[in-house]
Image (cartoon, rainbow, N blue to C red):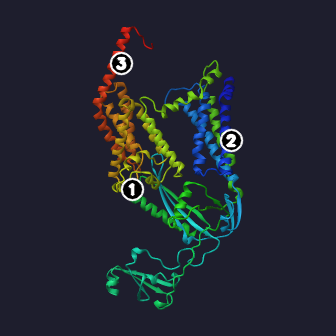
Amino acid sequence: MKQFQSKLKLIFLPFVFVAIGTIGSYTFLNWLLIIKLNLFALDEDFILFFIPMGLVFVPVFIWLRPRLKLLKFKTKGRGDPLSGMMMLAWASILASNCIAQTYLEVATGKLTNLDSISEIAKLPKTKYYEVKHFYIDKKQVRVKTNFEISGKHNEDFDMAIYTAIPVFDKQPSSGASGNSAHIMLPDSIKKILIVLNGKPISFTDLSKISPEKIESLQSIKGKAASALFGARAAHGALLIKTKKPFDVNSIDPPIVLVPVIPSAWIALKYQKTINNRLSQSEKEDRFKAFAAESQKDFDSKPLNDFIYLDRMGVSKDRKKYVEAVNSKENSITDLTILKPVNEAFEARFGTKLPWIFGSFGIGATLFLIILLFIPLRDIENIDSYLTADKPSSAMDDLKNIFVPREGYYFTPIIINLNLLIYIVMVCAGLGFITFSSADLLKWGANYRPAIQNGEYWRLLTNVFLHGGLLHVLFNMYGLMFVGIFLESLMGGKRYLSAYLFTGILASIASAWWHPATVSIGASGAIFGMYGIFLALLTTNLFPSTFKKSFLISTSVFVGYNLLNGLAGGIDNAAHIGGLISGLIIGYALYPSLKRRAREVDAEAETQQLIDEMTGKKDGE
């Protein structure tokens, strides 16, 4: 009982205080800086998850970690119990914090009543709107398709169709919503013969005809067209029949109308996830079916059937809707994108408020139950122990990973650079969990057509790009592990050169194998380093005990990742290219590394002999 009370006082209550302080502080700053003063326009995912993820980790690591070290963990078997308890505390606070920010956004959002949708540009911005008079023009829908690969092992292929539909005060007059109410054909088909009511006409005359006057259209080509109209129809003919017969000269002159600018755009998203292991043709068939289903739903969906509208903030989805709108009008800026909501305004809170406390309560209860079964260590003066374990010493573990030092200099620099590029991409609003292929291509992804066009720098830049959060974390963990062993052995400059060289060779292998695939990631270069490590493990450079255990574990790691890549969705060409080049480099470097190891051993033996002759002892 006494131990339980001590654990409550020393560990559990500080955990609760850290949670309350962290959630309360971040919620207040979010309300003040983002919502009230509107000082920053950050991506919603960044506000709701990315910042809290790092913010919560800091107090847990600095203040809770030293107290968790008071527990007497069993270290037998796999895993790190201390890290597990820290992760549980972090996840409990993070989940509650994320829900709290979502609730804050909803609770502080104001509802504005509009008589007509055009008033939205004249009044101060709010989050929610009720509109009396509006017209949603389905005929002018703008569409943006998006494809992404997700999942821990890139096993999911995500398909999305973003539709943006313009909203006006009332239904525009015929042709007012576009540049002209008359037929507009692209230049690519202007070699076709146009025949109106049996008489050939020019494309200039065609542009004057209102679609409402046309009864039927018929396209003929080849021998059939030539038989009717001769050489003039060598590229085919388009037969137009109007509802009422009239002479060519009586064709209406073109009506010049001022385009009506939409006051806002309604956002509607269709999405579906399929297996990324499917072949390219199977993916195309699945997408066609998905697009057909989406079109059918869109045609039948009553878009006017909503209770209120929710203005979209800065987010990845909003960016896609803007791209959909700007696919035809690139000059449009500061768009108002609205999501229709078909439920009572009072129901917008859902169960967010109780789950702020419920999510933390579940995590805290589990945390407390685990505390019951772990005894405290026998420490006479706990206050002195906690004082000795200062935050500065607790940060040493992080410094060992991210701060360069002798023998481990370029590995942390590479890790930090990769993480920095990922963070910059997140801050640029490109996403958080995953990035789109289009954005990665703009940032320097590997792509054979671009390389053939002279963009050879992509062979290197793609090595520092990653497809999302899990991609960069797993790659950097793999690099850290192999870097600890290799960099001190090879020397910093040689290690860096080998990393970059194998990365470029892996990119070349990927571009050679994939005719038109966007590929990114440091895994090719990392496989190159593992190739070097494997090559050296098969020599007598390492002691036999070290060599045996690490040769098995490294071979299993490499083999598993290569086999996993055979399932599809993973750039195995880059992995194999990096691995083979690494093996070759490893065997090529072995003689010089062996000589260097002998020199180091000789120096150590000489120093030991000198110490014995001079009477020095170890540690003096």
Viewer-proximal residue, 61 or 551?
A: 61
User: Which of labels 2 and 1 is toward the front?
Assistant: 2
Q: Which mark is residue 24?
A: 2
* Mark 2 to mark 1 CA distance (whole Å): 49 Å
Horizontal side of residue 16 vs 610, given as left or right: right
Task: Give the residue type at disc 1.
Answer: Ser
Earlier-in-chain disc, 3 versus 2: 2
Earlier-in-chain disc, 1 versus 3: 1
Can residue 433 be seen here? Answer: no
Horizontal side of residue 116 vs 607, given as left or right: right
Residue contact between numbered discs 2 and 1, judged by CB atoms under 8 Å: no
Q: Is residue 594 above or below residue 90?
A: above
Quarter of the picture holding the N terminus: top right
Position in image of residue 263 (x %, y %)? 62, 67
Viewer-proximal residue, 494 or 172?
A: 494
Q: Which mark is residue 604?
A: 3
Viewer-proximal residue, 473 or 588?
A: 588
Earlier-in-chain disc, 2 versus 1: 2
Position in image of residue 559 (x %, y %)? 37, 40
Element under disc 1: loop
Position in image of residue 537 (x %, y %)? 33, 31
* Mark 3 to mark 2 CA distance (whole Å): 57 Å
Residue contact between numbered discs 3 and 2, judged by CB atoms under 8 Å: no
Judging by the rendered image, the residue that carries numbered circle 1 is 279
